[in-house]
Amino acid sequence: MTEESPKRRDTEASGVIEEVLPNAMFRVRLDDGKTVRASISSSARHSTVRLIAGCRVAVKLSSQDPGRGQISRKL
C-alpha cells in the first residue's frame, strides 16, 4: 500500500522586508500585519536581486508552517 502525500497549497502574499537576517533569511511584514521569516527562492537566487530592508516582495507562504515562506519576486 502506498500513501499519497497531501497536496501542498502554498498561498502567495505581498509584504515589506523589515530585517535582513543571517544565512540569507529575511523578516517580512505582510500586508495583513503578520510577520514571517522567509528565504529566497531558487529562481530569484539565480538572477541578481538585491534585497534590503524596505523592499516590497511577493512571498509564498508554506502550508505546513505559516510562519515560514519563500520570497518569489521583488515588486
Image (cartoon, helix red, strand yellow):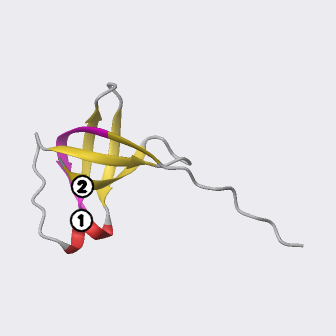
Q: How crowded is mark 1: few (under 14 residues within 10 Å), some or many (20 or more)?
A: some
Seen in the picture, residue 34 relative to 56 is either above or below; the reply is above
Q: Is residue 8 magenta?
A: no
State the residue at coordinates (22%, 57%): 22
Q: What element carries label 2?
A: strand
Seen in the picture, residue 46 relative to 9 is either above or below; the reply is below
Image mark for residue 44 = 1
Q: Name the residue under label 2.
A: 73
Seen in the picture, residue 22 relative to 53 is either above or below; the reply is below
The type of residue carrying mark 1 is Ala
CB contact under 8 Å: marks 2 and 1: yes
State the residue at coordinates (22%, 46%): 57
- Depth check, front residue: 22 or 69: 69
Seen in the picture, residue 49 relative to 33 is either above or below; the reply is below
- Which secondary structure type mostly characterizes the magenta part of the structure? strand
Residue 63 in the image: x percent, y percent?
54, 47
Q: Give the range drawn in magenta.
A: 14-25
